Every structure is written in structure tokens, then in C-alpha cells.
Amino acid sequence: VAHIKQISLTFGTRFELYKEFEKVGTMQKIFNWPGDFYYIRRLHWTVQGDIYNHQYQIHHFNQQIMKMDKATLFSGDYYVLDISNDEDAPVCICIAAVLDYWLYRKDKSKEKPLSYRFDVN
């Protein structure tokens, strides 16, 4: 349904996002002070929040596309993705995977990621 393609450049890495084999956007890290800020070209989405603690949001201008948070249940710890539109879910999951990749690649001391639990509203 959706997939990611890594593009290595001289000054960093970008990820192309595809939905049903059609390129829908290119994700890149813009800056990381005082907090991380990511931008997805073509979709005009931004990712802001506490990436390191998996508490962030994806917005298209003032409209929230997705909210990521943690949940602790009896069966363990999970990530909860609250996605407003079902059709955005595959791309949002790809974005969450890219953010995890950047986070865990940068900090080798971090534990393995939590399990994902996808709730599409």
C-alpha cells in the first residue's frame, strides 16, 4: 500500500514516500534546534514535537493529520497513532518508521522500539 525509498545526498538523507507505487512526498529533516522539525514536500506536511519520546504530531497547515503517543497496557508498551483520515494511514505509518530509523540510528544506547498499535479513526 505504501513504501519508503532512501535517497542519500551530500548533505544528509531524504526519504521518498510512495502510496500505491506513486510518489506522494519527500521527507527531510529541516533543523533540530530547539526541537526537531521535519517537512514532507508535495504533501506540505510538517512533523513537530518530542521525536525522542515518540510524542509528536503531523500537520497540514493548521489541520492535524496524525498524533503519535505512547500507551502502556497489561500486554506491554505500545505506540498509538491517532490518524484523522483512513486514507492517510499508510503514509503516516511510513513517516513514523522513518522517524524511528533516524532516532535509533543516531542514538545507539536507545532500547529497541516499542510495538506499534494502529488505531485509525
Image (cartoon, helix red, strand yellow):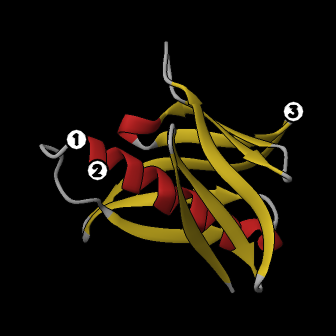
Taking the view exactly as shown, the residue that stands out farthest to the front is 10
Q: Is residue 58 visible?
A: yes
Q: Which mark is residue 107?
A: 1
Residue at x-position 43% and y-position 44%: 54
Name which of mark 2 and mark 3 comes first in the sequence: 3
Q: Which mark is residue 21?
A: none
Q: Is residue 102 left or right of residue 42?
A: left
Q: Mark 2 near mark 3, Cβ–Cβ under 8 Å?
A: no
The quarter of the picture where the N terminus appears is bottom right
The three-letter amino acid code for the residue at tag 3 is Asn
Q: Which mark is residue 62?
A: 3
As helix, strand or loop, the secondary structure at mark 3 comes to: loop
Residue at x-position 84% and y-position 53%: 43
Q: Mark 1 near mark 3, Cβ–Cβ under 8 Å?
A: no
- Which quadrant of the structure image shows residue 81? bottom right
Place of residue 121 in the rendered image (x, y in percent of width and height, measured from the top left): 74, 67
**Residues under labels 1 and 3: Cα distance?**
31 Å
Give the answer, above or below, for where 70 lies relative to 21.
Answer: above
Characterize the local packing of mark 3: few (<14), some (14-19) or many (20 or more) Cα atoms within 10 angstroms. few
Q: Mark 1 near mark 2, Cβ–Cβ under 8 Å?
A: yes
Place of residue 76 in the rendered image (x, y in percent of width and height, measured from the top left): 24, 65
Tell me the residue that label 2 is attached to.
104
